[in-house]
Amino acid sequence: MTDKFPSISFSFTYGGQKPQTALVTAKPRVRFEGCPLCSSKQMSELRSVDCTIHPLYHPLVPPHMTWMRCAACEHVCTDGYFSAEVLSVIFGKTSENQRPGSGFEQARFHSARMVERVARHCAPQGRWLDVGFGNGSLLFTAEEFGFDPVGIDLRPSSVEAMRKLGFEAHCVDMADYGEDGSCSVVSMADVLEHMPFPQRGLEAARRLLKPGGILFVSMPHYNCAAWRLLDSGNANPFWAEIEHYHNFSRRRLDLLLQDFGFDVLGYGVSERYRVCMEMIARRREG
């Protein structure tokens, strides 16, 4: 069955001129046909939340998000993902803390600990590819340690800003980037939960990493006491995070990494954002 596309009117400006009104026709969400990780159809609604308070909210985005739970693999995800038209609106705006160079001094300390954890498992040399580099802090710090930093991001303004700072950056999907086996490290810090189908990101990471290369991932940890405490106080911001499609548990992330050819080397608590976890994994030989 084909959903009727809603027509939504909104205002925009050109170079400070009088706001004009445009009529945009878009399908807000493309529904998942089943669990995006295991394809099971055994999905049940977990909760529906108001996301209009999110700083990147736009009237083109549905005001409520519906979260589902898979009975087969226990994964938690939204009921669908944004169309390309809606994504172009969301990516047209960037939060202040995600702009390259923002809060670089404080972020440097957090990034240093992330790089140190990775460097325990590989020599600090070769290409470090950061996917969705945000404020750029991880790349800035990886360079200090001896890596050759490269970033990719879907926000053109962020890529332009990184280039102005003298760093190699590309506005491209990671599936379309780079040569096979060209990277020593691929970092996906708070990225997989933004991908409708995280498997594609892990396939690309495995392709880009040289055998024995290191994958660094971080994201909110859905199944931990800190998350449940936020829920109990009705203070959990991640349920209304419009850019997220997934809430991973440690167990589900571990299994997914193994399925895509990675051996998990370590787990840690992330210092970048609230209630987040980190995992470091090595690309399996062969």
Image: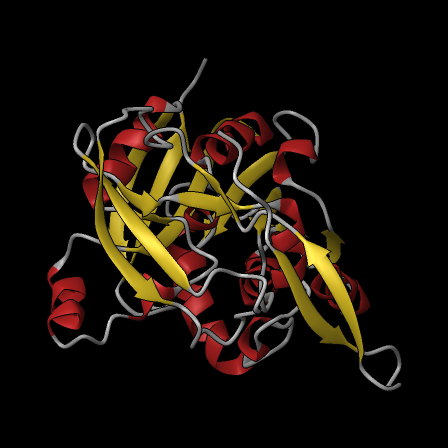
Choose between 201 and 31: the one closer to the eye. 31
Choose between 96 and 242: the one closer to the eye. 242
For residue 230, what is the image quadrant? bottom left
Q: Is residue 252 above or below residue 263?
A: below
Q: Residue 255 location in percent, x, y?
A: 26, 30
- Residue at 75%, 54% (x, y): give it: 168
The answer to whether residue 179 is visible is yes
Q: Is residue 162 above or below residue 31?
A: below
The answer to whether residue 149 is visible is no
Quadrant housing the C terminus: top left
Q: In this view, does 24 lie above or below 217?
A: below
- Residue at 69%, 71% (x, y): give it: 10
For residue 240, what is the image quadrant? bottom left
- Residue at 61%, 53% (x, y): give it: 87
Q: How many labels does the image show?
A: 0
Q: In this view, does 214 lie above or below 93?
A: above
Q: How is the image coloured?
A: secondary structure
Q: Residue 158 location in percent, x, y?
A: 70, 64
Q: Residue 259 location in percent, x, y?
A: 33, 23
Q: Residue 70 location in percent, x, y?
A: 22, 35
